[in-house]
Amino acid sequence: MSDITTQCLSDREQLIQEITQAPDDLVQAVLEFLHQAKGNSDHPLAKFAGILSDAEAEELQESIRKSCRQVELNEW
């Protein structure tokens, strides 16, 4: 697609043109991404989904593992 043609199309029109020419496996990947990105917007925590990188999430999980009290079942 030439730059002149691209400049005249909306993002949606451009996406549709690209998708019609894409191989099936790429179309499937884009569709899965769209479904995942839309998610469950009704959930009150949905706006926080995906805001951490994998490294940040791992660091947070490690901090929780190290800092939070572990319950000993035999303690009672």
Image: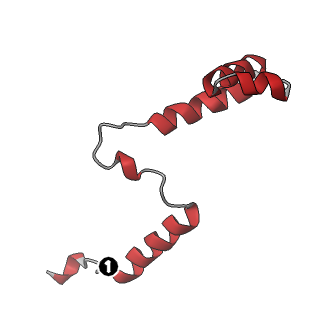
Is 22 positioned to the left or the right of 2 in the image?
left
> Residue 20, relative to residue 32: is it above or below?
above
Q: Which is more toward the observer, 20 or 6?
A: 6
Looking at the rendered image, the quarter that the N terminus falls into is top right
Point out residue 53 in the picture as x, y percentages from the top left corner.
55, 61
Q: For numbered disc 1, what is the local secondary structure?
A: loop
Across and down, in percent, residue 69 comes to 28, 81
Please, what is the three-letter code of the amino acid marked with disc 1?
Cys
Name the residue rendered at 30%, 37% in the picture: 42
The crowd level at tag 1 (other Cα within 10 Å; few <14, some 14-19, many 20+) is few
Asked if residue 73 lies left or right of residue 31, the reply is left
Image quadrant in which you'd find residue 12: top right
Q: How many discs mark residues in the rendered view?
A: 1
Q: Which residue is drawn at 58% across and 36% down?
A: 33
Please give the name of the residue rendered at 37% of the width and 36% of the height, measured from the top-left corner.
Answer: 40
Q: Which residue is nearer to you in this view: 76 or 25?
A: 25
Q: In this view, does 49 lie above or below 58?
A: above
Establish if 38 lies above or below 60: above
Percent position (x, y) of residue 61?
44, 70
Residue 15, percent from left and from top: 67, 25
**Residue at 65% in and 20% down:** 13
In the picture, which quadrant includes the C terminus? bottom left
Q: Is residue 76 left or right of residue 17?
A: left
Which residue occupies the foreground of this view, 76 or 4? 4
Q: Which residue lies furthest to the right in this view?
A: 2
Judging from the image, the colouring scheme is secondary structure
**Residue under numbered circle 1:** 68
